Image (tube, rainbow, N blue to C red):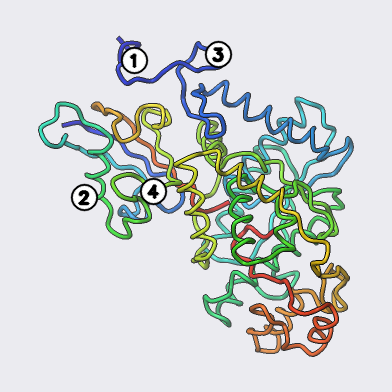
Amino acid sequence: MAEIFMFLYSGGLELLCDSKKIHNVNVEQQNGEDKLIMKDLLSWVRTNLIKERPEMFMKGDTVRPGVLVLVNDCDWELSGQLSTTLEDKDVVVFISTLHGG
Amino acid sequence: MEEEKKRQRGVRLCCLCNEQRASLKRPKTLEHICRDCFYRVFEDEIHDVILSNNLFSPGDRVAIGASGGKDSTVLAYVLSKLNKTHNYGLDLFLLSVDEGITGYRDDSLLTVHRNQIQYGLPLKVISYEELYGWTMDNIVKMIGLKNNCTFCGVFRRQALDRGAALLKVDKVVTGHNADDIAETVLLNILRGDIARLSRCTSIITGEDSPIPRCKPFKYTYEKEIVMYAYFKKLDYFSTECIYSPNAYRGFAREFIKDLERIRPRAILDIIQSGENFRISATTKMPEQGTCERCGYISSQKWCKACVLLDGLNRGLPKLGIGRSRGSIDGCKDRNEKNGGKSIESKQCGTLDF
């Protein structure tokens, strides 16, 4: 179990999640693994947080292309995307680039 | 301990300075770089694009088309920074168009007003209401949510030019980025719009606007613009226009993003393909003239904005929508003279080229 701070920036992502930009969530790793990874967080978000139009946020088991993800202010493409490990008090930021300009 | 934690997570050092922890993967080069190196290469590349394409001359008055969104905010920030550090000698202005969309543009204009103070750039706001006598709110009340983006796109294009003329600027710069341009190349191919395809990749467009427009972000990835704005904590507005379902462009956009995930170079490759299209000399292109009614540049008797406005004012807003413009007598003759179909296409959202 880890407490994760999630920030949803821009592009209306927060509208899919109770109109809140900041979420403190407690997520448990799945299938008895000892480490929590981004994949677990996303599937938790999908099940518990997204109230409508999940396709605006997710595609398959990952975020839809055009949504940038930062874990502790670092591009998740550097830390292994879905397999990025998460620890207690980590900060995950989602930024949608899909509209507005 | 802290050092160990970082290593555990597999984050490497910046491949440029080899000192700081990498913060992002560049889509263009796949390099892992730290924030400071990122700021440097991001700004240097834009500086190189400006120099190698001779975008500006010393003493130019330049209007930055500012919507309050991420692209134009980053553009205003970077351009005023480069202007100072490299002594371009430019007089910079912010130029915003107020379409009259309550709950969207009024909020984003507040951002632009803050940017005016933050970057010390004078701001000019020009509204649809003063130019055309119609706000988008009123237009939508009359025509509904179908085709409203056509009105908005056509009106915005002229509004920027008219605002630029009032500011007496030599050039207008817009925040169109590499992703936008790749998307427009695809759209113009899908629509068969040869005239636009041949000019949508130009970094400076002059022939279809009275005042030249340039796109310093032509080769800049959207991901990097967003990361730059995020890391620098720039103040930008990011909500989707309440009237824009943007369906057709949305498909192209999503396709580009899917391609980028598989191979980020694809965006630059599509731009290059667009640049390399050669149009056969026998293809009939629309002749550029001026609108008989307002004097704006137009390939028809009346410019698109006047046709749309005439429809609105006569209570027939469907005039001028769609591909055939046979509904107005004069235009029809002119169309036939020019060798057939109009090459007008629908414009949508903020990305009219």
Q: Secondary structure at mark 3?
A: loop
Q: Are marks 3 and 4 on the same chain?
A: no
Q: From mark 4 to mark 2, how far is it between C-alphas?
A: 18 Å
Q: Position of residue B212 (x, y in %)?
A: 82, 52
Q: From mark 1 to mark 2, how far is it between C-alphas?
A: 31 Å
Q: Are marks 1 and 3 on the same chain?
A: yes
**Residue type pointed to by label 2:** Asn
**Disc nearest the viewer among 4 and 2:** 4
Q: From mark 1 to mark 4, how far is it between C-alphas?
A: 28 Å
Q: Is residue B30 above or below residue B1?
A: below
Q: From mark 3 to mark 4, how far is it between C-alphas?
A: 32 Å
Q: Position of residue B174 (x, y in %)?
A: 70, 49
- Side of B37 relative to B81 (left or right): left
| Residue at x-position 67% and y-position 70% | B345
Label 2 belongs to which residue? A48
Q: What is the quadrant of residue B5 in the picture?
A: top left
| Earlier-in-chain disc, 1 versus 3 | 1
Q: From mark 3 to mark 2, how far is it between C-alphas?
A: 42 Å
Tag 2 subunit: A
| Earlier-in-chain disc, 4 versus 2 | 2
Which residue in the rendered view is the most extreme toward the left? A32
Label 1 belongs to which residue? B7
**Residue type pointed to by label 3:** Cys
Label 4 belongs to which residue? A64
Q: Is residue B238 above or below residue B103?
A: above
Label 3 belongs to which residue? B17
